[in-house]
Amino acid sequence: MHSPTTRRIFLGQLGATLVASRSVLAATTRANDKLNLGVVGVSGRGGDNLKGVSGENIVALCDVDAHNLENAAMLFPQAMTYGDFRKLLERDDLDGVVVSTPDHTHAVAVIAALRAGLHVYCEKPLARTVSEVRAMTNLARQKDQVTQLGTQIHSGDNYRRVVELVQRGAIGTVKEVHVWVASSYGGMELPKESPPVPEFLDYDLWLGPVPFRPYSPEFVPFKWRYWWAFGGGSLADFGCHFMDLPFWALDLSHPDKIEPLDGPPVHPESTPPWLIVRYSFPARESQPPVALTWHHGGRKPGFLAKELADQWASGVYFIGSKGDLLSDYSRHVLLPEDRFVDFPRPEPFIPNSIGHHLEWIEACKGRGRTTCPFSYSGPLSETALLGNVAFRAGQTLEWDAKALKASNCPAAEPFIQHRYREGWSL
């Protein structure tokens, strides 16, 4: 990291003080019932997550952007700062780590944290590739650490009330769901110019495991989601939020078929600004198979009445044998409305959340459990990413979740597996 000399001296002195007093810190943590946390990525979503866990002992901050790091350090002057998360994870006084980097560095940071015996809160989606997600999910299960995916909408009251309605049979049997979001990322050509890397940015560390490519402000800091090398566009970004609701309400897990229905021509570098993909989920015990269709970039289901289409920029639409249900993050409605005027809503049976970050914190302390552990959010993340895989492969995938393969489509393999540059591995 590039920083003024005086700041390096100050941080060096602070670091020496903290390292020398690790035993004191650990004792203080036990006495005050607070966790010692490291936060990797401290701006944007990272800043929000840092705020969410700020009631604990923030002892370590990490960011490849010196400006971001300095701003966070002003709020937590007791924390030691790092440019490289691997150095942060060498500490022996940590209880947990919050990872809020771009998607392409989630897996390397989380895997290392789990191997170090740390609890992990990670932003969504769980990783950039399906194989990385599976590795993270499996290791979390083996290590038995407390994990939570950053799908904070899951902890809101609205999703709970929707799940209760669906699971109590308010709209009957559900065999079809449509999800749409207004978001549109991608559709870009690779930049032709590469200006100098800003002195405050460690671009090589920002790339992490991704094969080198020249720096561009079209990648860092805001548009990385537009590129396959770093993210997965709108589907990877919002799929875990909006598909979370049908996953929860209908007890979904791995799909067995993923069909790309419509989209722009596949670009080798940039994500699609719009896309329509259908997922098929097998029957679960007494519940029938489910077809879930994803739309983004302004595309919406053709059956949607204009009034609803105008009022709901994004939504999740359950089609049931007795009626329909439409929801977004904060509101929902039973349809047709006149049929449900006098409908007696079920008594709430899902307890309200204490807060998404607080769930993780309390679970780390042995009090309660998280609602989006990797065991749940792993299959959710894989599903979102598989829509992109099918689109890029250009055909319907017959998905063998156990083998982590599209049994009918060898062409999909490069989009499923991660491949790292020399010096990086899981």
Image (tube, grey):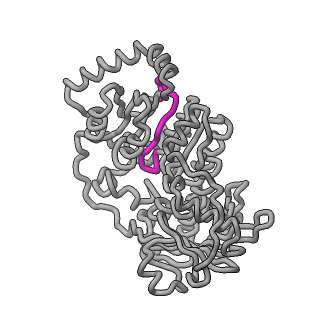
Q: Is residue 138 left or right of residue 71?
A: right
In the rendered view, would you say 16 is above or below 416? above
Q: Nearer the viewer, residue 49 or 183?
A: 49
Magenta stretch: includes residue 92: yes
- Quadrant location of the C terminus in the rendered image: top right
Q: Is residue 266 visible to us here?
A: no
Residue 101's spot in the image, x, y percent? 42, 45
For image coordinates 25% across by 58% down, the residue present is: 193
- Quadrant location of the N terminus in the rendered image: top left
Q: Nearer the viewer, residue 323 or 191?
A: 323
Residue 186's spot in the image, x, y percent? 39, 66
Please give the count of numbered marks on the rendered protein: 0
Residue 143's spot in the image, x, y percent? 65, 34
Q: Nearer the viewer, residue 328 or 102?
A: 328
For image coordinates 47% across by 29% down, the residue present is: 89
Residue 270's spot in the image, x, y percent? 41, 64
Q: Nearer the viewer, residue 105 or 51?
A: 51
For image coordinates 35% across by 34% down, the residue present is: 83
In the rendered view, would you say 329 is above or below 113? below
Q: Which residues are magenta?
A: 89-105
Q: Is residue 56 visible to us here?
A: yes
Magenta stretch: includes residue 104: yes
For image coordinates 40% across by 36% down, the residue present is: 54
